[in-house]
Amino acid sequence: MFRIRFPLDQIPDWAARFEDDGSDARFLADVRPAVRRRGYLTPREFRDLCYWKTPRSQSRCRRNAAGDIRTITQAALATTDDALKMDLLRLLQGVDWPTASTILHFCDRRPFPILDYRALWSLGYVRPPHYTMPFWLGYVGYVRELARRSGHPMRTVDRALWQYSKSRQHSTRTHHGQG
């Protein structure tokens, strides 16, 4: 189902080419520890992560009440069930598979890859498939195994997958962050 297009030992090289506008570092240094300590996202953190993944979702993301953001993200981050995490986050307006994966990637205690057409291209998919729970769980398992086998953190693997596609895939699509 998945097949990485480049050797595992190139992961650090591709990840090093990833250009960060500062959001990445802020999410890792500020947002991640605060969310993990508190156990849920604030509306501002939620909107920032959603915007980073896909600015187009902002009007829908803003429709979520603060209490809903707190309750749903707290439940998603508290459960150990990977499928339930995804299902819960997708209850929020403006959050679909890729954005939910971004929230998990930056905020959950377990490593999660970001679901993105670029990363999928680097794993052998010319076009992203229709997302389903079995596909998501297979993707999570495969990328976690890449991280384990390569000895690199999930963020490094994720950056490498994204950057390899950006450098090698010819596309007219433009996205912010990893959208």
Image (cartoon, rainbow, N blue to C red):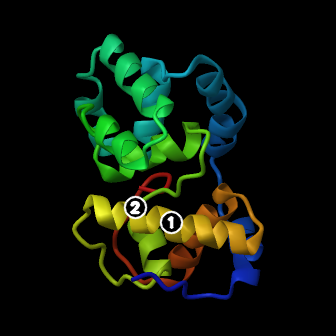
Q: Is residue 48 visible?
A: yes
Vertical order, 4 against 153 (above or below): below
Label 1 environment density (alpha carbons within 10 Å; few <14, some 14–19, many ≥20): some
Q: Nearer the viewer, residue 146 or 165?
A: 146
- The residue tagged 2 is 137
Q: Residue at x 63, y 33 (%)?
A: 32
Q: Residue at x 47, y 40 (%)?
A: 103
Label 1's element?
helix
Q: Residue at x 75, y 66 (%)?
A: 16
Q: Nearer the viewer, residue 149 or 161?
A: 149
Q: Nearer the viewer, residue 140 or 55?
A: 140
Q: Amino acid at mark 1?
A: Gly
- In the image, taking residue 173 as reference, residue 42 lies left or right, namely right
Locate the N terminus by quadrant.
Answer: bottom left
- In the image, taking residue 68 as reference, residue 2 lies left or right, namely right
Measured as percent of width and height from the top left, residue 14 is found at: 69, 74
Measured as percent of width and height from the top left, residue 111 is found at: 60, 51
Q: Is residue 54 visible?
A: no
Vertical order, 114 against 139 (above or below): above
Q: Residue furthest top?
A: 67
Q: Residue at x 70, y 82 (%)?
A: 8
- In the image, taking residue 171 as reference, residue 93 lies left or right, namely left
Locate the C terminus by quadrant.
Answer: bottom left
Q: Amino acid at mark 2?
A: Leu
Q: Are marks 2 and 1 in contact (CB under 8 Å)?
A: yes
Q: How many marks?
A: 2
Measured as percent of width and height from the top left, residue 79 is found at: 46, 34
Which quarter of the figure has residue 107? top right
Residue 141: assigned label: 1
Which quarter of the figure has residue 95? top left
Which quarter of the figure has residue 160? bottom right
